[in-house]
Image: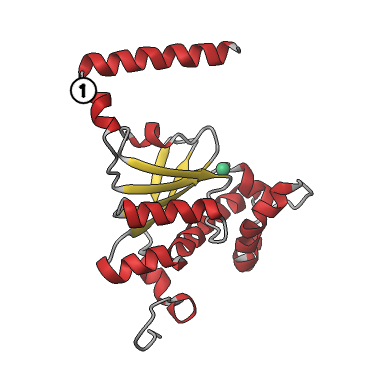
């Protein structure tokens, strides 16, 4: 076993002991179930540690991570996560959190053959295509990459809203709310992009609205 793995197991033992010392019933309570308020969809990047950076305790955040925080509705994994989070856990908020210095985003801006990764990043390249004028106008590579991180988070939030899981819940309860966030690695800060996603979606309802009856909102 590697030193890191040995250390990790030792860390875990100490953590469990400390938790039990603070609260003898902590793990029994945890084992009884979860009631998270939010679903967090983020990048797999090892530097973006959701619980640590948000100060969240076990049980508070339902998490889905993949390369470059993509919400591809034909991806069975994210589809199952959305369904479970919305229909079973009744999360009130869905956060899509991108991050600056994202390797996936940098790759999408510099096309090259990366095998299976090309297929995965295709939706991200589609975001580039959709916002090409704005992105190509930014001549600084680093700033262009940051801009795509932000545009991507917005697009993935729209994809969340396009899903029937979220739309069905929206029309019943008005929840979940969807939030585009970006983690600035250099600052350690998470920033809410401040977009009202139901307003952002309003323009697109004529295309993506799944409401089964009544006149379509234009
Ligand atoms: Co990333």
Which of the image's four quarters has the N terminus? top right
Q: Which residue is mark 1?
A: 25
At x 55%, y 45%, the residue is 66
In this rendering, does residue 137 appear at all? Answer: no
Q: Quadrant of residue 126?
A: bottom right
Q: How many discs mark residues in the rendered view? A: 1
Looking at the picture, tell me which residue is in the foreground, 29 or 47. Answer: 29
Instruction: Tell me the quarter of the picture where residue 76 sits.
Output: bottom right
Secondary structure type for disc 1: loop
Up-down relation of residue 120 to residue 198 (above or below): above
The residue closer to the viewer here, 51 or 185, is 51
Give the answer, above or below, for where 99 lies relative to 25: below
Q: Residue at x 28, y 38 (%)?
A: 33
| Left or right of 84 on screen, residue 66 | right
Q: Where is residue 20 drawn, in percent x and y? A: 25, 17
Answer with left or right where residue 218 lies relative to residue 122: left
Mark 1 burial class by Cα count in 10 Å: few <14, some 14-19, many 20+:
few
Q: Quadrant of ligand 1?
A: top right
Please state, as top left, top right, bottom left or bottom right, where the C terminus lies in the image.
Answer: bottom left
């Amino acid at each position: 076993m590697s030193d890191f793995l040995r250390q990790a197991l030792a860390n875990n033992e100490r953590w469990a002991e400390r938790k039990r010392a603070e609260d003898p019933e902590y793990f029994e309570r945890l084992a009884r179930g979860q009631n998270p308020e939010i679903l967090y969809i983020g990048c797999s990047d090892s530097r973006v540690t959701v619980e640590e950076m948000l100060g969240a305790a076990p049980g508070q955040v339902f998490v889905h991570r993949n390369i470059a925080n993509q919400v591809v509705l034909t991806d069975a994994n994210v589809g199952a996560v959305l369904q479970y989070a919305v229909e079973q856990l009744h999360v009130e908020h869905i956060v899509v959190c991108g991050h600056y210095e994202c390797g996936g985003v940098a790759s999408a801006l510099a096309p090259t053959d990366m095998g299976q990764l090309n297929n995965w990043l295709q939706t991200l390249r589609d975001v580039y295509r959709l916002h090409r004028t704005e992105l190509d106008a930014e001549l600084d590579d680093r700033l262009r990459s940051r801009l795509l991180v932000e545009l991507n988070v917005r697009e993935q939030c729209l994809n969340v809203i396009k899903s029937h899981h979220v739309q069905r819940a929206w029309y019943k309860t008005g929840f979940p709310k969807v939030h585009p966030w970006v983690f600035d690695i250099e600052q350690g800060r998470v920033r809410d992009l401040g977009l009202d996603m139901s307003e952002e979606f309003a323009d697109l309802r004529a295309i993506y609205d799944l409401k089964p009856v009544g006149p379509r909102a234009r």
